[in-house]
Image (cartoon, rainbow, N blue to C red):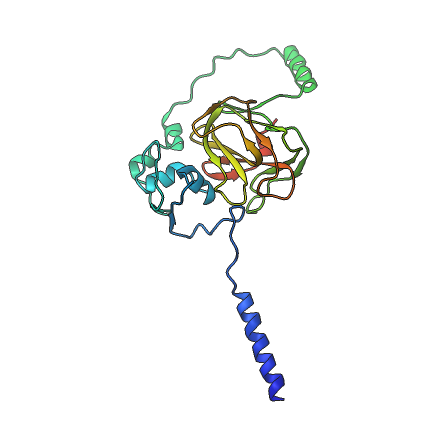
Amino acid sequence: MLKILGVGVVAMALVSCAGHRAPSSSLNQPPSIRLNHHTVSRGDTLYSIAWRYGQDFRKLAAINGIKPPYNIYPGQRLQLNGKVPRQVASSSPVARKKAVAKPVSTKKAIPAKNKKSLTRSSTRQKPQSKRTGTIHWRWPVRGQVISKFRPGDPLRKGVDIAGEKGESVSAAADGTVIYAGSALRGYGKLLIVKHSDVYLSAYAHNHRLLVKEGSKVKAGQRIAELGSSGTNRDKLHFEIRKNGQPVDPLAYLP
């Protein structure tokens, strides 16, 4: 009887320990945003750290008093949470938008009969790009979408597009490469492109990167070769971030 009780106690203890095991972390399922600090490692950039924690790079820079070109160094301890200085907050795109008066439209009215012809012609042709403000988005690779964006799911922050190894990966819009490397675990060989102060895009699991950090790229320009780095099959993982937060790429692509 005592042996049975002893085994039962040990089993309960093991179950209790298993239930409190610390979860493994990857950048597809990043550490909690409740962490207060991040220590910079070799290969980190301010942009990649902001990407990891789902933050706006401008806010992260402001919290830590880092000014453009946002240089950081290994061993530096960055604060992840804090108040943004008032002068920085007032210069944000949202604040500027409120301050600017809406321009008066100078477009001429289109006659009703011409509107019908425009509608017909627009439905016949598939658009090569879709516009968001001044940004014209286009597909980074041709292929079947095998995984879609799901809000709040750390494993579905973008879309996965099937393809073959070596296939061309193109820039989804004009911009500047702000990260090129493989330091972000879970993304393989990764490119991050800055299109504006609001929008960034990412291209993960590449076989080979064809552009470097600081490179200016044009929409449709070949920037990488599709591959399977950091994953189990050949595919492109594509993300769009708005003010640091993942958004559904399918809402932006034509």
Looking at the image, residue 51 sits to the left or right of residue 40; the answer is: right
The image quadrant where one finds the N terminus is bottom right
- The residue located at (55%, 74%) in the rendering is 13
The quarter of the displayed image where residue 72 is located = top left
Q: So how many labels did they put on this image?
A: 0
Looking at the image, residue 70 sits to the left or right of residue 230; the answer is: left
- Closer-to-camera residue (58/5): 5
Relative to 191, say whether 112 is above or below: above
Coordinates of residue 182 in the picture (x, y in percent): 50, 40
- The residue located at (60%, 43%) in the rendering is 231
- Closer-to-camera residue (181/120): 181
- Closer-to-camera residue (234/81): 234
Coordinates of residue 39 in the picture (x, y in percent): 37, 48
Coordinates of residue 79 in the picture (x, y in percent): 35, 47
The image quadrant where one finds the C terminus is top right
The quarter of the displayed image where residue 14 is located = bottom right
Q: Residue furthest bottom?
A: 1
Coordinates of residue 214 in the picture (x, y in percent): 43, 27
Looking at the image, residue 79 sits to the left or right of residue 122; the answer is: left
The quarter of the displayed image where residue 222 is located = top right
